[in-house]
Amino acid sequence: MIELDDFSVGFGAGTALRGATLTIRKGDRLGIVGESGSGKTMLALCLMGMAPDSAQLSGRLSIDGRDMAGASEAQWQVLRARRIAMIFQEPMAALNPLRRVGDTVMEPMRVHEGLSRGAAHKRALALFEEVGIPEPVDRMRQFPHELSGGQRQRVLIALALACDPVMLIADEPTTALDANVALRITELLVRLARERGMALVFITHDLAAVARTTQDIVVMYGGDMVERGATADVLAAPMHPYTRGLLAARPDPTVPARNADGTRRRLPSLPGSVPPLNALPQGCRFAGRCPVELAHCATRRPATRLVADNRQAACHLLEEQAR
Amino acid sequence: MGYFIFRRTVGFILTLLAVSVVVFAVMNVLPGDPALTILGMDATEDALAALREQLGLNEPLLTRYVNWVWNALQGDFGISHSFRVPVADLIVERLLMTVSLAVAGMVVTLILALGLGIGAAAQHRKFGDWGVMFLSQLGIAVPAFWLSMLLVLLFAVNLRWLPPGGFAGWSDPMAAIRSLILPTIALAVVQSAVLARVTRSAALEVMRQDFVRTARASGLSRRRVLWRHVLPNAMVPIVTIVGMQFASLVTGTIVIENVFYLPGLGRLIFQSISNRDLPTVQALVMLFAAIVVTANFVVDLLYVVIDPRLKARA
């Protein structure tokens, strides 16, 4: 359904996305993980045709077999909401504060499908029920500021489902929510994807959420896809040093918060932070922060190796080992 | 909401009361004797004294103020010194002229400013944006009276499409509208130049917000996103400026009516100031102040209509 081949996004001297290659099929549930600045949101925006005007796109991006890399705004408008829909991070800011949420959800149905107010209202009501909003008739008449964060995110999901898309991109949908609500939202997304046979692209830095929601995972760093595979495999046996670092930085509730000598245990963390786009190393993007770096890592870009069936990683160390 | 309206109404009355004190005080400390103005330089001292007595000018200041306010509340603003008819009649005759001009000016301002401002925001940092910014800078810089003269020169003198000034009354609506076209444009150009800039920056501010991205992700066209999502959210700053502009629009009619010889309140206030016609000037200043305060009141009400989040606080 969606195919990316050597797809890159540049901004002047910097590169936000380098040689992304990816296939998403109907019914797939794919997780994209990485820290802020890893290019995961840029990737999602490109799939919606909403990259900033200043972005230079190259490579192939095809949706439903049609090349969309140079597509016009009008061509994208046909796909948005009806084929691919997206939900965003901040459910408060992502809803028009001056509109009743029911009207917001009904708008794409009325615009794209020419539904009457009555028909749109009926469908919106069914969607509110499907996404688990209690007392949907009353809720539809309310404004975003009158709803809780979890309810707002459910409204946004209902909006995304308004025109029955075949793919839903969720860009950190739970970041702004508390843990309990976040858990229910991820459960909802999985249930909706299953019931509707809809593809789900789940973008997050929450590894536990990815483990619960997705079958496959892509790990991104500095605009590169560094590792991918079945979610369970990657999380159980990470191959790329970045993935290993990411997993090690995860808090583990079974480990006591204090060491034997009574000092507070600190979470292991990756040294440094993601450099700005125009200061990324030319070779492996992770060079400079990598604990097992080789001499040529910073200058030579590692090839993406097919390590096992449905399992890829891009690291010089893996090539050394294979030799 | 009821409490809000009550509070604002009390504020409205207090403001007008304060304005009335200032107006009355200023008019009475001004040099010049109204009796002398009415009777002329040749009047005898006896005649002047008799007239002063008749006008109540010998009463203490406070008594005169209370009388003035009390009569004004009953719609009696006294007799015009120069026209020798009740001030209230003078105002009623001319009110329609000025209100039509101000309302027409406001409507044209809104259409021009919202269209150009939103258009410029949509074209941010492109040719259309620069064009609108340049034109609005020009519009702000050009004085209204000079623009009026240019308009008369072009459309009335050279092209002969429209009358150069004057007003033949409302009996022939077509002729009335034709004589209002140039004054309306002259009035609206400056105002819409200011408002277009406000609209543009307010829209740019809104366009950075997340819900605009949501609207685009819903497959809505840029045009629909701009007019249905961005503009309503930009309305709070726009309405604030419109409220302030309505005040300057009303005062702007003073200049415009004099340039185009339109028999409205603006022309009347100019004439009565020249003639030291105190009762008329006092009444008109009060009226203009009331219009400004009312405009602010309406703006405050509009905020609540525009933004449901304010309803709880109001």
Image (spheres, rainbow, N blue to C red):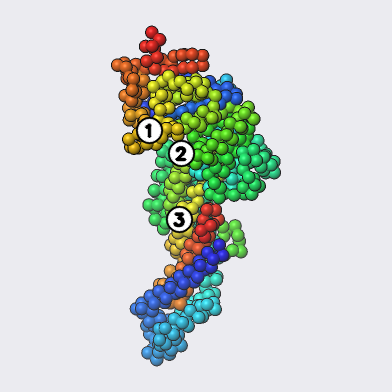
Q: Nearer the viewer, mark 3 or mark 1?
A: 1
In the depicted structure, whether residue A285 falls above or below residue B273: above
Of A313 and B129, the residue lying toward us: A313
In the depicted structure, whether residue B205 falls above or below residue A248: below
Q: Which mark is residue B123?
A: 2
Q: Which mark is residue B241?
A: 3
For the view shown, which residue lies furthest in the left direction?
Answer: A295
Q: Chain of mark 1?
A: A
Q: Chain of mark 2?
A: B
Q: Please, what secondary structure does the residue beneath circle 1 have?
A: loop
- The structure residue drawn at horizontal position 44% and vertical position 83%, both measured from the top left corner, is B64
Label 3 crowd bin: few (<14), some (14–19), many (20+), radius 10 Å: some
Mark 1 residue type: Leu
Q: Please, what secondary structure does the residue beneath circle 2 have?
A: loop
Q: Which mark is residue A127?
A: none
Distance CA(mark 3)–CA(mark 2): 23 Å
In the depicted structure, whether residue B206 falls above or below residue B296: above
